Amino acid sequence: MLTQEDLKQLAQKGISEQQIETQLGQFKTGFPFLKLEAAAAIGRGIVVPNATEGRKYVEAWQRYKAAGRRVVKFVPASGAASRMFKDMFAFVDADYDKPTTDFEKKYFGNIQHFAFYKELDAACQKNNGKGIKELLAEGNYKAVAANMLKADGLNYGQLPKGLLLFHNYADSPRTPMEEHLVEGAMYAASNGQAHVHFTVSHEHMELFKQKVAQRADVYAKQFGIRYDISFSEQKPSTDTVAANPDGTPFRNSDGSLLFRPGGHGALIENLNEIEADVIFVKNIDNVVPDRLKGDTVLWKQIIAGVLVTLQQKAFGYLQLLDTGKYTHDQIEEIIRFVQQDLCCRKADIKELEDADLVIYLRQKLNRPMRVCGVVKNVGEPGGGPFLTYNQDGTVSLQILESSQIDKSNKEYMDMFTKGTHFNPVDLVCAVKDYQGNAFDLPKYVDPTTGFISQKSKNGKELQALELPGLWNGAMSNWNTVFVEVPLSTFNPVKTVNDLLRDQHQ
């Protein structure tokens, strides 16, 4: 099936024949839906620290950082912002000239409130010889929208979200990338240094580096720290082959195989290369101006404190198991910790022989750990927190997307639609073992949790394969704990008009 040219193409990408065979097999067999026990809820997998506990966790985090640990803030930032402007692209191409939909009316009625207003006005002056006010006064709305979207204007239709102007400040407006640098200084800096890592697309790498060169020193001076800012791209070896509807490889017009990015699950490889004890993971568009950062900073420290507190306990138990000198009561205590604190349960645990029980406990304790902030469900898109059956028959906490759930199973769909919380990609991860060695993160991926979607290219239908999502199946075999965080910490920007919400003004 594979030609000599195909093999050359694979070698260039760093993809093995075995990987392609596996992927083509997955198109034929599909992926199994996950078996669910219940949606996580308060008292059933979701912890809500009170004020006293919150203070204790913040102190635990401060002590951890003071011990000279390396902390990194990891921000997936490669997505283009084109979806943010879907409605405005539609307006530019529409057969009418004046704002007609509610979205268009809101955009033009509040245009002066966008942080990019001054830059957009300058682009209009340059390209049309008139500013925004003049163009709107004469009814030339489309020129204004085109100047925002097109390459000879601000080019916002093609830029990544991380480089758009989101928030106004007295000195100059800020991009989300800058807001993440500020956040990094406020809760992730240790040893006087803030390590921030962005995953970006190849075509935008230089733009990100230029912006960092312009602005990082400003924030370093403001917070009295040094920045270590690094970038990576999604690896070509994580691309997945596309298939025809019959499962055979989809080929381009020149006969070459068509590969597509494997989705955010590919970033487990990038995460695996980060040298750190603890890594914060947060989406690029979930940022607020400084006046609203208080809750974000507080709760980031709380969930990090929960993480290092649990990790310390797990490490202590692993060291105890290493000695071989433990009592029956101590083993019972470890079982309670695994089942109650880490929410990992095994139905037949009492039937295990002592030696097998210790092997099981060691395996569950000695693996990467993450604490995930979850917010109350308000109908926004996001992964749901669930108690899910794993490949080994245990039940543990997972973040699931709707694609992983059997929609024909009414009980499961009720769990998903009536779930009280969802995860807005608010994670803090411990990625070293109790002996200080980095975990090999790809070993903890559940490969059965990818999914297949239907796409097209040049009018021809194709099937696309997405790898297990970064915070879904790619972290399936981690220890996972959910903590309820306030809705004020979740302020995503999915459309340009979201920037008009009070949280972004």
Image (tube, helix red, strand yellow):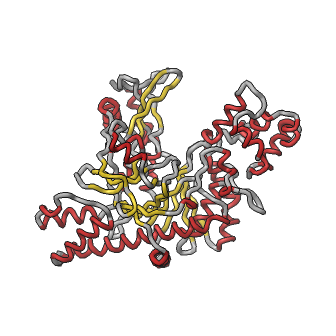
Above or below — where is 470 with respect to 311?
Answer: above
Let me know if residue 368 appears in the view: no
In the image, what residue occupies the spot 48% across and 49% down?
382
In the rendering, at what x and y percent does residue 464 appear? Answer: 43, 32
Residue 278's spot in the image, x, y percent? 45, 66
In this rendering, the answer to whether 57 lies above or below 180 is below
Foreground residue among 328 and 110:
110
Residue at position x 25%, y 49% in the image: 391
Image side of residue 27 versus residue 284, left or right: left
- In the rendered view, does 426 fall on the left or right side of 367? right
Residue 464 against residue 50 in the figure, above or below? above
Count of numbered labels shown in the rendering: 0
Q: Residue at x 37, y 65 (%)?
A: 432
The quarter of the picture where the C terminus appears is: bottom right
Question: Does residue 166 appear left or right of residue 61 in this picture?
Answer: right
Looking at the image, which residue is at 62% across and 72% down? Answer: 225
- Give residue 325's quadrant in the image: bottom left
Occupied quadrant, residue 25: top left
Judge whether residue 40 can be spotted in this image: yes
Percent x, y for residue 374?
46, 58
Where does the image place residue 495, in percent across and percent down from the top left?
63, 44
Q: Nearer the viewer, residue 350 or 476?
A: 350
Specify the quadrant that holds the N terminus.
top left
